[in-house]
Image: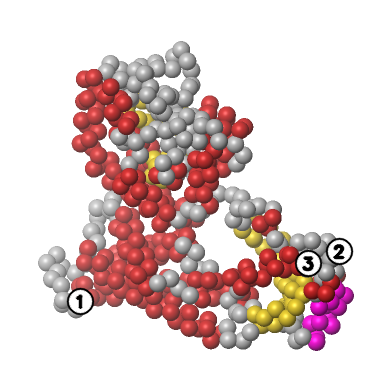
C-alpha cells in the first residue's frame, strides 16, 4: 500500500504549502506595490515586513490544515471543494491581521491582504489538485492482500482500511485457525506462506483481535523468507471509543488513548485568537460596561465587581470576574449552593444583567490574562468540581483546555437547569473535535443566538440536573 509512504507525501505537501504561502505573499506584494495598478500615496513599504509576516502565516496555515485533517490520506486523494480553499485563505488572512493588531511600528496594507487571500487560495488549490493527480498515477496498481484473523475482526477491518489506504487493494482471502466455520477461510495460520506464494500476495494484514501473542509471532516468523509486507492491526475501538494517537520511536510503540487535545501550533493559534478577540471585545464593550458600572452603583450597595474561585486549565484555580448581580454576602448562611431559576438573592438590575449575559463582560479580562479562553467548557467552582468528578466519569478531562466564555454545550441550549451529564457529553465532544473552525462557529452561534441563562454558584442558575 502507498500508505507506507504517506509520511513522505505529507512532509512534501507541508513544505510545498509553506512555499505557497511565501510565494503568494511575494506575488500579492508585487501586484499591490510594483505593477502600477494601485496608488501608493505613502510610498512603497519594504518587503522585509511582508516576508516576516508570511513566515508567521505559515504557522497558522499548518495548524489550520492540521485541525481540518487535510493531511489525512483521504484528503490527499481528494481535496476539499475549491470554495473551501478560498475560505481557508480568508481565515488565514484574518488570523494574520489579528496577530498584527498590536503592532504599531508597521501597518500592513489592506489591499495586500485581500490580494494575498485570493492568490493564496488559487495556488493552494492548484497544488492540491496536482497532488491528487500524482496520487492517481501512483495508485493505479492494485495490491493483493491476504487477511489473517477471525471472520468478524476481518469484516470490521476491511472497510476501514479502504478508507485510509491511498492505494487500492484486492483481498484474495483470509487465513484463520479460530473460525467456527473454517470453510470461509482459505487456510490455517500454518498455510500462510503457501497462500502468499500461490495467490501472489503482496501484503499480509493481521487482525490481532482474538490472536494470542504467540500466534502473532508465529505468523510474522513464518514470513521471514517471503517478499511480502506485513501489517499488524489493533482494534483499538474495542478498548476506547475516543480518538487515539500511535507514536513509534526507537522501536517502542506507544498508543496514546487520551491526552490534551491541543499542543504546539494549534495551542498558539487558539491563544492568538483569544488575545485578539478579548482585546476587541473589551474595546467594543467599554461603553456598555461603563453604563452597567454606573447602574450597579446607583441601584445596589456593595462592590461593582464580583470575584469567585473557579477551575480552569489543568485543574488550576483562578478568580473569575463578573458584574455583581446579587446582594452582598448572598451565601453567608447557606454556603455554596446551586441557584434557582428565579433567585431571590438577585436584585432587579442583577436579574436583567444575568438574563442578557451582560454580567459576563468582565470575563474578557480573564481571557486576556490567560485564565480563560473565548471558547471552552464553562468553569465550575472547586466545591462542585469535586462533586461532579465523583459522580461523572471523565469529568476531569474538561480541564485539558482553558475554560471558556461560551461553549458547545451552551450554544446548544444546555444551560440553566439542564443536565450536567449531558453538558459533559457536549464538552467532551468539543475536546475531541476541536478546530479553529469549530471555535469560530461557536462564537458565531453565541453572537446570533445569545446565551441568556447561567452556570452554578451565587452568580448563576446552573442546576445539577438528573439524567
Q: Specify whether 180 is left or right of 439.
A: right
Decide if residue 7 is in sight here: no
- The local secondary structure at tag 2 comes to helix
Percent position of residue 366, x then y: 38, 37
Q: Quadrant of the C terminus?
A: top right
Name the residue beneath numbered marker 2. 214
Percent position of residue 151, x then y: 76, 68
Instruction: Say whether marks 1 and 3 touch (CB < 8 Å).
Output: no
Q: Earlier in the sequence, mark 1 or mark 3?
A: 1
Question: Dot 2: within a 10 Å radius of its alpha carbon, few (fewer than 14), some, or many (20 or more) residues?
Answer: few
Quarter where residue 404 is shown: top left
Instruction: Tell me which segment is drawn in magenta.
Output: 186-198
For the point 55% across and 71% down, which residue is it? 73
Percent position of residue 430, x then y: 49, 49
Name the residue beneath numbered marker 3. 150
Which of the numbered marks, if any, corresponds to residue 15? none
Membership of 157 in magenta stretch:
no
100 shown above or below 207? above
111 shown above or below 285? below
Q: Earlier in the sequence, mark 3 or mark 2?
A: 3
* Mark 1 or 3: the one toward you: 3
Is 291 in front, or is 157?
157
Is 316 in front, or is 359?
359
* Mark 3 or 2: the one toward you: 3
Percent position of residue 316, x then y: 51, 35
Name the residue beneath numbered marker 1. 34
Amino acid at each position: 500500500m502507498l500508505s507506507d509512504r504517506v509520511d513522505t507525501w505529507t512532509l512534501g505537501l507541508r513544505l510545498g504549502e509553506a512555499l505557497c504561502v511565501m510565494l503568494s505573499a511575494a506575488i500579492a506584494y508585487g501586484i499591490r506595490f510594483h505593477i502600477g495598478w494601485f496608488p501608493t500615496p505613502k510610498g512603497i513599504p519594504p518587503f522585509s515586513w511582508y516576508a516576516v509576516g508570511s513566515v508567521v502565516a505559515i504557522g497558522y496555515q499548518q495548524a489550520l490544515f492540521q485541525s481540518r485533517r487535510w493531511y489525512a490520506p483521504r484528503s490527499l486523494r481528494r481535496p476539499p471543494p475549491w470554495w473551501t480553499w478560498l475560505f481557508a485563505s480568508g481565515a488565514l488572512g484574518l488570523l494574520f491581521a489579528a496577530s498584527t493588531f498590536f503592532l504599531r511600528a508597521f501597518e500592513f496594507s489592506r489591499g495586500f491582504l485581500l490580494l494575498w487571500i485570493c492568490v493564496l487560495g488559487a495556488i493552494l488549490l492548484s497544488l492540491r489538485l496536482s497532488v491528487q493527480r500524482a496520487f492517481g498515477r501512483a495508485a493505479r496498481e492494485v495490491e493483493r492482500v491476504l487477511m489473517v484473523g477471525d471472520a468478524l475482526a476481518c469484516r470490521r477491518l476491511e472497510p476501514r482500511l479502504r478508507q485510509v489506504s491511498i492505494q487500492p487493494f484486492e483481498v484474495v482471502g483470509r487465513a484463520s485457525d479460530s473460525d467456527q466455520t473454517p470453510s470461509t477461510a482459505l487456510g490455517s495460520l500454518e498455510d500462510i506462506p503457501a497462500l502468499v506464494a500461490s495467490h501472489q500476495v503482496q501484503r499480509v494484514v493481521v487482525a490481532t483481535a482474538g490472536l494470542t501473542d504467540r500466534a502473532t509471532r508465529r505468523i510474522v516468523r513464518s514470513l521471514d523468507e517471503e517478499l511480502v509486507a506485513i501489517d499488524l492491526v489493533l482494534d483499538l475501538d474495542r478498548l476506547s471509543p475516543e480518538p487515539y494517537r500511535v507514536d513509534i520511536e526507537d522501536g517502542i510503540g506507544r498508543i496514546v488513548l487520551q491526552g490534551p487535545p491541543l499542543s504546539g501550533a494549534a495551542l498558539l493559534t487558539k491563544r492568538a485568537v483569544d488575545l485578539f478577540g478579548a482585546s476587541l471585545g473589551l474595546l467594543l464593550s467599554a461603553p456598555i460596561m461603563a453604563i452597567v458600572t454606573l447602574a450597579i452603583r446607583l441601584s445596589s450597595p456593595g462592590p461593582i465587581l464580583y470575584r469567585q474561585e473557579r477551575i480552569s486549565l489543568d485543574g488550576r484555580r483562578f478568580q473569575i470576574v463578573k458584574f455583581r448581580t446579587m446582594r452582598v454576602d448572598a451565601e453567608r448562611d447557606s454556603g455554596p449552593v446551586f441557584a434557582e431559576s428565579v433567585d431571590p438573592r438577585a436584585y432587579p438590575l442583577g436579574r436583567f444583567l444575568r438574563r442578557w449575559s451582560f454580567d459576563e463582560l468582565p470575563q474578557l479580562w480573564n481571557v486576556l490574562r490567560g485564565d480563560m479562553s473565548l471558547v471552552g467548557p464553562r468553569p465550575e467552582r472547586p466545591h462542585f468540581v469535586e462533586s461532579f468528578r465523583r459522580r461523572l466519569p471523565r469529568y476531569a478531562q474538561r480541564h485539558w483546555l482553558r475554560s471558556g466564555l461560551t461553549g458547545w454545550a451552551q450554544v446548544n441550549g444546555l444551560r440553566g437547569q439542564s443536565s450536567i451529564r449531558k453538558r459533559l457529553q457536549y464538552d467532551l465532544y468539543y475536546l475531541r473535535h476541536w478546530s479553529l473552525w469549530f471555535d469560530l462557529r461557536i462564537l458565531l452561534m453565541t453572537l446570533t443566538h445569545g446565551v441568556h441563562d447561567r452556570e452554578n454558584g451565587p452568580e448563576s442558575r446552573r442546576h445539577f440536573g438528573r439524567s
